[in-house]
Amino acid sequence: MWVDLIVTVIKVLVVSTVLLTGVPIMVWVERRGSAMIQDRLGPNRVGPMGLLQPVVDAVKLMTKEDLTPEGVTGTNRFLYLLAPAIALVVAVSTFIVVPFGYDPGLELFGHAIGGFVVAPDLDLGILYLFAVGSLGVYALVLAGWGSNNKYSLLGGIRASAQMISYELAMVISVVGVLMVTGSFSLDDVVLHQAGTWFGFIPKWNVIPQLIGAITFMVAVFAETNRLPFDMVEAEAELVVGYHTEYSSMRFASFFMAEYINMITASSLIVVLFFGGWTLPGIATPGGWLGALATIGIFAAKVAFFLWFFVWVRWTLPRFRFDQLMALGWKWMIPLAVLNFLWVGVAMALGYL
Amino acid sequence: MEFLTAHFVEIMFYTLAALTVASAVGVVAFRNPVHSAISLLASFLFVAALFVMRHAEFLAAVQVLVYAGGIMVLFLFVIMLVNVKRLDPEQVFLSGKAPAAVAAGVLLGALIAFGYLAGSLGPVGPGPEALRMVDGAVAGNTEAVGWLLYRQYLVPFEVVSVVLLVAMIGAIIFGRRDAGLEEGGGRMEQ
Amino acid sequence: MTVSSTESPTQRPPLADPFPEGSVAAVEQAADGHTVLTVDRSHLLDVLRRLREKPELACDLLADVCGVDYPDREQRFDVVYHLGSLEHGHRFRVKVPLGEDDPVVPSAVGIWKAADWFEREAFDMFGIRFQGHPDLRRILTHEAFHGHPLRKDYDPSQRWLLTEKDTMAPRWATEDQPDDEHMDTVVLNLGPSHPATHGTLRTVVRLDGEHIVKAECEIGYLHRCFEKMSETHGWQQVIPYTDRLNYCSSMINGVGFALTVEKMLGIEAPPRAQVVRVILSELSRIMDHAVCLGANLVDLGALTNFWYFFQIREEIYGLLEKCAGGRLTVSYARIGGLAHDVPADFEDEVRKLLDSIPKFLDDVETLVTTNRIFRDRTEGVGVISGEEALAWGWTGPCLRASGIPYDVRKAHPYMGYENYDFEVPVATTGDTYARYLVRMEEMRQSLRIVRQALDNLPDGPVITDDHHVALPPKEKVYTEMESLIWHFKLIFEGIPVPAGEAYGFTEGANGELGYYVVSDGGGKPHRIKVRPPCFAIYQAFPKILEGLMIPDAIAILGSLNIIAGELDR
């Protein structure tokens, strides 16, 4: 009983530490990466290669004055204060069902660690993730409403419409994966992708379900509000949308939530479509070393997709809001449906 | 401490139930529609927690995903898009509809009473364990719900989906009627 | 996509008098190529309409409307209209004298839409009232401002308090509108402090959802009455002020002013100065277009292109700094030539630029020109027809994007532009995408001009040796009596610009940049009126917006390249 608890606490601590330190690293990658793309230097003054810049940024954000806009009182003030908390809580708590490595039955303090995932026996896995993730939009909507600012409100309105539209496409595009796997558990999803076809093609879901993978990635971009889907912020149109009126650590909460969401989103792309911690040849190694190797593989794949997020952001312009909605409803959802129809047919014919 | 561990489930249930009712009251008590909507959201989340307590995790997840994450967001979208501040409170809330309210209250009371009586006579339907059983073997809650829906309750399920389809088409027709000026525009209503 | 127009320099209009007997008090051919008509206000509308509609006159461009104050005259004010015909290439100046006690003229808004803001400005600055103007309010100064600042008897030392009640909100914004029962509209201020209003611009919009139902621009946030300040400074001292008009291409402004005054003096800058002016002007044009497109793309979310464009700008600034010492505000042109000669490595530096700039342009073209998202955002957005654009007084790249190949460098060549081989890019669709394409191509054409100019860069002095205008060299001042006297007279009396007036116009980065200069023979300008191209362009902005969405408004605003320094002066 107690050891169970300790193991879980350790896992929670490790995962949240990795997530929260992932944020400054991502900020650094984003700033240096964009500088690289844009033919400039980027932050290079604090620490070697500017690596300590995020630390300084964090100190700055924490020591800044915390302002509440005029006219935000009573219940609205409560909503205004609640919004950044929701953002951060949702961002951190979605990650707990993501399996980030292979557990060949390892023990800690003479007790099974129960898999490299914080909540191993949640057989709802992906469903939990979508359910909790869908609450993240309230952070944006309430921030937009509570700020008493027309630009923020417009951002909040856009957020609500955008999230719903792309959530639909996202969920449908995952259905194919769940059908093949036959389980909601992300552990099973990964294990299903171990092994190869013809001995060299990895059995990753992306290969038979390319359309699903693409729609999922597009939808995930929209869900994390990254360019070209950053309607909700759209600094040129809505100042910065929902978090215009936030300063100091409340602003930082939104900021951190965005990057944690990116990490979760990249992990999901990897787990659902790119074989999770598996590589052709090393699917289920044994021992602590093997387990660490799988975590490394997983991290490398996630890092690639994180870079992909950065890369896309600094390459593409932004959609217009109605074009975004048209893309979501007229292209993404039909394509996602097409994907799961194809998977159904293929399964019925015995190909998958 | 003894009491707490012994009655943990009951305490949790009554706490959550009280919170559910309180936030449901908030929906009608708040003057500002956005606050009402948030209150309704809270009520949904508490109901989801109650589902979890009955081991209906799938239902809980769907409750959050569909109601909290989907429908309430749409509610908020519409409320925020339409500036409702101008409507007088008297107009928004019940006036002259007291008989209907009383009738609804009586019906609700009857329903609760029936549930209570039926419960005291014996178990109503299968217990929570049944929500994990498939063909007599233990499986996940999701699978169990799936088996129930697509085997035992297939006809009601299909009927409900047809009703929903009809409702959706009706909504679209109503929506299109005064949407002439939005042709080709990027309006967000679906 | 490109056509070149080969119109000859300013032509004399047909002299057969098309006006009814007695309506025009005087006709005169001015030295600046304009036909000057003096008209009594009772005949004004008739004359203007004939100028616009008679096929042999066809003045389709109303370049400018302004007031001039002659306090010593019996009829104290002149209202001056500058008209041009794109078809015939001729130019008219119509002057209407008005008395102080009754400064009223009929409004020309019904003939040219462009008259709208120009007349408001004349009202604001001189108190001249335009009868029949739909919305005659102050435009550059605050609504609660007292008096008319460009009148010669205005006391600039007055001070008073403006209260918040007096902020300029359009009437419709505060009115309660009757709505249909379930849709309400919201009034939103885009600006004056908004990420997409580069500079201080303010557009008040009424929104239905995200659709703009009604819009109105408020300008004047950067107004510093440059024209008034010029009246208290010597001729050469005006040049630093011109830098602050369109500060993205300050060189062009200074050159334009210098050319106008040189026209009045009847002198020309030495050939080397002319060619250096062309090179730096064209580089400034590239810079201006780069800033415009870069900012436009940032507003569309494509930040990376902004940095590519700013790299171009940075390199040109490096060159300008070497030449002039300044970067943003160069103050390099002088009446009669240039402040000093270019550095020895000028040619190498420019050649380096000629190599590096196309690379950045190619990068941007790869990223943007065929990008689906970019095209969806810009194609068919903010369309204006050529006819409409001209009626609003549009010139420059924005007009050419609507299919009208009017470029001052081709239509009325100056500084030897007729000797360079270049094309005037024209697009036909008149949308934001067309404006992007035209600007991209113009940058490449400017590079062509620079290359040709550099190949033919003559040696010699860079400032005229007419010492009425330019200071003699310092060592001569120390050694020769005559030079000392020149020096003394220039410093104490200023440049003896003969009494008279001239309208000089050049192709600024945004379009026709005109200077209407009046001299009374003293050492200072009597009146300088700038015809800022984006003033005319911006006044059509609210009309384009109606029915579009906020993101469209942002995309269009960026493509029009409104520079507050030039807009508000």
Image (cartoon, rainbow, N blue to C red):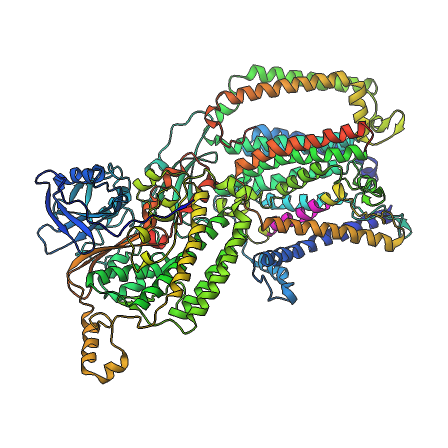
Residue C53 painted magenta: no
State which quarter of the image contains the N terminus of chain C.
top left
Give above or below for C503 relative to B67.
Answer: below
* Res C14 quadrant in image: top left
The answer, for residue B73, to whether it is visible in the render is yes
Residue C216: % across, % down: 36, 40
Using the image, determine if residue B15 lies above or below residue A42: above
Q: What's the magenta bit mostly, secondary-structure-wise?
A: helix
Q: Is residue A143 left or right of residue C294?
A: right
Front residue of A58/A308: it is A308
Q: Position of residue B77 (x, y in %)?
A: 55, 33
Res. C31 image quadrant: bottom left
Question: Going by the picture, which residue comes out furthest to the bottom?
Answer: C479
Q: Is residue A333 left or right of residue C251?
A: right
Give the magenta-colored segment's residue range.
A252-267
Q: Nearer the viewer, residue C320 or B66?
A: C320
Quarter of the image with the C terminus of chain C is bottom left
Looking at the image, the residue that sits furthest to the right is A110
Relative placement, left or right, of B53 versus C107 is right
Was residue A264 drawn as part of the magenta stretch in this picture? yes
- Above or below for C28 versus A323: below
- Going 69% across and 44% down the picture, which residue do you hit? A265
